[in-house]
Amino acid sequence: MKELSLHILDIVQNSIKAEAKNIEVLINESEKENALRIVIKDDGCGMDPEFLARVRDPFTTTRTTRKTGMGISLFEAAAVQTGGGLSIESEKGVGTTLKVNFVLDSIDRAPLGDMASTMTTAIGGAPRIDFLYRHTTDKGELVLDTKEIRETLGGVPLDIPEVLQWISEYIKDGLSEI
Ligand SMILES: Nc1ncnc2c1ncn2[C@@H]1O[C@H](COP(=O)(O)OP(=O)(O)OP(=O)(O)O)[C@@H](O)[C@H]1O
Ligand SMILES: [Mg+2]
């Protein structure tokens, strides 16, 4: 069973390939509602309706290196096996929003995994993109906004080890409190 954070990283890679300038990763874990909801939103190239209609099919891809595109179909399968599901909205030239819902206490739900690694890998790999990571639970919220970090750093790039280390610790500390 693949950790959900690794699926999230795959989906964020799609947004990076789509030349997004802004990527949002929103996670809501609610024990009260027995739900885990993940939204990944970008302002990349988007997809036309005809492509969107067949994008969950593992044989739909614009990759040239192989004929299968598994990122979306595997994430959907992980959600469906818990009793949840995946939906995608996309508009050519505007962007794409993927929403994935899981039944929180399903024994078939993969653990969320290491979100600090997922976000630092994404940010370190695409330091010019702005990322907003917002994670809420019934207890509170964690927000990481690279626009704010950039302002504070005043020109220091995000992909240097010291900054990525700081981001990783900020996420770990924040998640331990919610
Ligand atoms: N956020 C997005 N914006 C624009 N196009 C997208 C986006 N996400 C996916 N796509 C399109 O949908 C196709 C299928 O995506 P999917 O993640 O399932 O497979 P893949 O990225 O092609 O391959 P893999 O994920 O296995 O490396 C992609 O090749 C791309 O053309
Ligand atoms: Mg992909």
Image (cartoon, rainbow, N blue to C red):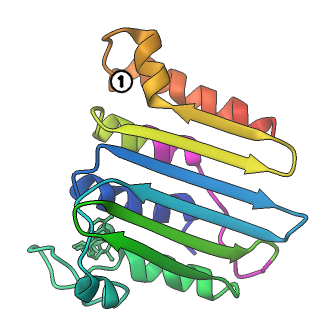
The residue at 37%/8% (across/down) is: 154
The residue lying furthest to the right in this view is 32
Residue 42 lies, in percent from the top left, at: 37, 55
Q: Nearer the viewer, residue 145 or 120?
A: 145
Question: Can you give x and y, in whole percent of width and height, for residue 29 in the image?
Answer: 75, 59
- Magenta stretch: give its range: 106-120
- Rendered image quadrant of residue 49: bottom left
The front one of 113 and 40 is 40
**Residue indicated by mark 1:** 158
Left or right of 147 on screen, residue 65: left
Residue projecting furthest to the left: 64
Q: Where does the image place residue 13, in percent across and percent down from the top left?
A: 32, 57
Q: Amino acid at mark 1?
A: Leu
Which residue is found at the position 15% from the left and 76% from the top?
62
Question: In this picture, is 82 found above or below 91?
Answer: below
Q: Is disc 1's CB within 8 Å of ligand 1?
A: no
